[in-house]
Image (cartoon, grey):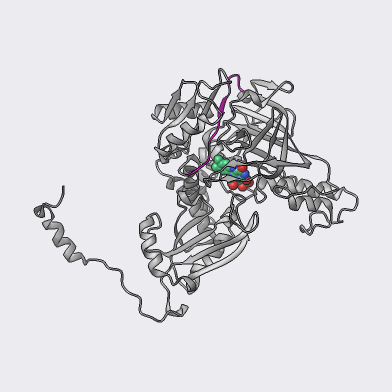
Amino acid sequence: MAYDDLRDWIAALDRAGELKKIRTQVDPVLEVTEITDRVSKSNGPALLFQNLKGHPGHQLLINQFGSARRMNLALEVDALDEVADRIRAFMDVKSPQGFLDKVKMLPMLAEMGKFFPKTVSTGPCKEVIRRNNFSLDWFPILQCWPQDAGRFITLPCVITRDPNTGKRNVGCYRMQVYDGQTTGMHWQRQKVGAEHYREMLRRASSNFEGAPSKPGVGLGGQSAAVDLMARSCGGSVLADHTPSGKMEVAVAIGTDPALTFSAIVPAPPDVEEYLIAGFLRQKPVELVKCETVDLEVPASAEIILEGHVHLDELRTEGPFGDHTGFYSLEDLYPVFHLSCITHRKDPIYSTTIVGKPPMEDGWMGKAVERIFLPLMRLTIPELVDINLPIEGVFHNLMIVSIKKSYPGQARKVMNAVWSLGQAMFTKCIIVVDEDVNVQDIGEVTLKALNHIDPERDIQFTLGPVDSLDHASRLPNYGSKMGIDATRKWPSEGFTRPWPDEILMDEKTKALVDKKWKELGLDK
Ligand SMILES: Cc1cc2nc3c(=O)[nH]c(=O)nc-3n(C[C@H](O)[C@H](O)[C@H](O)COP(=O)(O)O)c2cc1C
Ligand SMILES: [Mn+2]
């Protein structure tokens, strides 16, 4: 049964022995991080802090997804492959050949009905409505690391609307608290929230004197608005003539785990995360209308922030101790102005920390890896398995095994990965043959490095890189590397003989199996 809300999920964690309640007083400034970091490194439980310095009566949940077991619990499966299997079953749908086939499809169609979000008239997130006199200072928002620019909301579900299609997006983008009513909005330029923002800018610029007659055509930089667009989320100077206007944004904090997880999933831009969450929890997400903006938010959330991002304003955001294990440096990002806060009577503040892996986000990333494999196979059918090692912090290293059938296929796969949504950020791809277990780093190291002639087998390319990359030649733009560690074929110009892998024959193995006990070699 789907978790109704964060509380239901906390109760489930508790029942499963996966939650530790902490009654000792702890400071949300740095101290929560140090405790959670130690717990993360020892594969410990989710933590519910119940006595936060400066925030009497408040509770803070952290590390809810911080182990393979909790990730499975969050998605209510025994193994993440079950989710992948459900996705595969949906993709396997063939056109019905006759009446009987159509009848057979009915249960699946009925099941699909369970996924769509449902708008309800009210919900627990409206227990307290604060249109005036509200302040973010009320919540136990963390300062995570010593050199962080301040306090950051680290696990928000940021909800925006596509001005063209009306579809809603939910993305997890951190928010630096500037004051009680203002935060940063760290949607990186390649993310869907940033695209909605750019589209609003394009529209504002089309109403602007001197703007190009066809708004938003390219980012050539003729108009000031286009210039700002190009610079937004990472530029350096504001243009002279900036378009005015505001974009509505709502933020949910403390939702059921399927929804929180769907906010980090790299879904295609046109798929609403509300639908993804419905698919994952097999029950519709219930939504309520906001008080001051035209957006719908999860009815059972702990806290909702409503407000606007102004189109003519960027502000310094960061530094922030990031999931690369280094600080992401300060940069310019849009600003979120709150117009209303609604929340439960005694809201539980849900958050996370990022830093050197392994951390909670690593487990979320591993879940994405498993769930997306069948979807990646739609465009890369030769894909056998993938591994994004946690220390590769997701964008730095992807190891893929393929069923190779034609010359040059490893390089085709690299290019396919680099063109696939957020996989565009992958700095280094290692492609191996299907006999290599990509989950075994020892085996990958042995086989991949044996199989390469580096100068011949490394492919460099240029393109967008993750905003968090601190080594690239420019912010957001740099090089990537693919290593073709597959066995080379004569048709690829390799004419030397290729040695066999050393493997004992079955007969000898069976013989030794029989004698093994007698040999007395087991301790
Ligand atoms: C804990 C955590 C924090 C994140 N913070 C940010 C962030 O500040 N900015 C950002 O662009 N992406 C951030 N991400 C990644 C996005 O949530 C992820 O790319 C997501 O797919 C974006 O959704 P979208 O495709 O709808 O834009 C974060 C992910 C996690 C797990
Ligand atoms: Mn999205």
- The answer to whether one can see residue 110 in this image is no
Residue furthest left in the image: 518
Q: Is residue 345 above or below residue 235?
A: above
Where residue 442 appears, x then y in whole percent?
A: 36, 57
* Residue visible at 37% across and 58% down in the picture: 437
Would residue 501 be found to the left or right of residue 297 on screen? left
Q: Which range of residues does the magenta coloring cover? A: 344-356
Q: Main secondary structure of the magenta part?
A: loop
Residue furthest bottom in the image: 495
* Residue visible at 39% across and 56% down in the picture: 441
Residue 424 falls in image quadrant: bottom right
Residue furthest right in the image: 209
Q: Depth check: give the residue in front, 90 or 265.
A: 265
- The answer to whether one can see residue 387 in this image is yes
Where residue 288 appears, x then y in whole percent?
A: 66, 30
Q: Is residue 510 magenta?
A: no
Q: Depth check: give the residue in front, 333 or 373.
A: 333
Q: Depth check: give the residue in front, 487 or 316.
A: 316
* Residue visible at 31% across and 72% down in the picture: 500
